[in-house]
Amino acid sequence: MAFDAHVLEIMISTPGDTADEVATVKDALHGWNADRAPGAQTILLPRFWKTDSVPGLSPSGGQSVINSQLVDNADIVIALFDRRLGQETDTAVSGTAEEIARAADAGKPVHVYFSDEPIDRSKFDADEYARLEKFRAELQAKGLLGVYSSLTDLAYKVRSAVESDLGGLGLGAPSVVRKGEHALPRVRVEKEKEQYSDSKGRVKTRTKSFLVLENKSQSLTAEGLTMKLGDELRSTLIRDSDDPIDLPPFAELRWPLVLHMGMPDQVIVELKWTENGTAESLKQPVTL
């Protein structure tokens, strides 16, 4: 029988040595859906970069693509570590570390688990493990971390964590979901590094920021779309007009953004548009 439901995107964030853990978390979330979805009127949708991201290019690199496609759209983030921390990015000690920080800064529930299983010494990298332990100590100072002693233990703890999150998200009763596709306007801040020569001919690097507005829908235009930016962001955006616009599927608009010291780490952008004659709105947290 069909039922109305909230659909929550659960991002699995992890380095490349946790294939079994990723499969376990996905199975745990699907198991929760089978047991609880109709009664809770909620469906948990696992999202993992290897299976759910779309190939794309960004001047800021591949991690920026993952951030915009998965991290920024996630409702809950589950981060997993076994014996590796992962590859560094431009702004963090690893891609997973950057995803954790970005989600936490956006106010999303983030649950981080470290493996307590016996070490396979044939695959052990002492230097990489030292990096992981240093990151773990730094993260420990910011909150409560979890450990798992087996895949069964991990599955139980993930289900318990998500169950706990549902009460705090304040979902309420789901609205009736219209059949078919919806317009999906979203906002993000994108940063690009460029080199330049100063007055003495020395090569230096600076960061340019852009506010990006895109429609992730495959088929519906966001008609009469407006952005309410708030005082903190409005004065820093170089934009010719605030008039409503029609944003077609997969379309993207970019405006230069001048960020400065003293600005908040996060702002709320309110989007309003029309689709199929129905007024829609969204208040989206945006990390600067």
Image: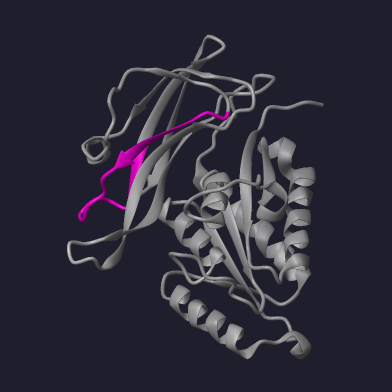
Q: What residue is drawn where x is 67% and y is 80%? A: 116
Q: Which residues are magenta?
A: 250-268
Name the image quarter holding residue 129.
bottom right
Instruction: Name the side, left or right, on which 268 lies relative to 87.
Output: left
Observer-nearest residue: 1 or 203? 203
Observer-nearest residue: 21 or 258? 258
Instruction: Name the side, left or right, on which 218 lies relative to 261.
Output: right
Furthest residue in direction front, as rendered: 201
Q: What residue is drawn where x is 67% and y is 49%? A: 47
Query: Considering the image in quadrants, where does the N terminus appear?
Result: top right
Name the image quarter holding residue 261.
bottom left
| Residue 146 rendering spot, x and y as whole percentages | 59, 71
Instruction: Name the side, left or right, on which 13 lies relative to 193.
Output: right
Observer-nearest residue: 194 or 188? 194
Furthest residue in direction left, as rendered: 199
| Residue 201 rendering spot, x and y as whole percentages | 23, 65
Q: Is residue 252 above or below residue 111?
A: above
Q: Is residue 62 above or below residue 154?
A: above
Residue 150 colored magenta? no
Instruction: Name the side, left or right, on which 2 lies relative to 274.
Output: right
Q: Is residue 155 above or below residue 187?
A: below
| Residue 166 rendering spot, x and y as whole percentages | 57, 46
| Residue 71 rendering spot, x and y as whole percentages | 54, 50
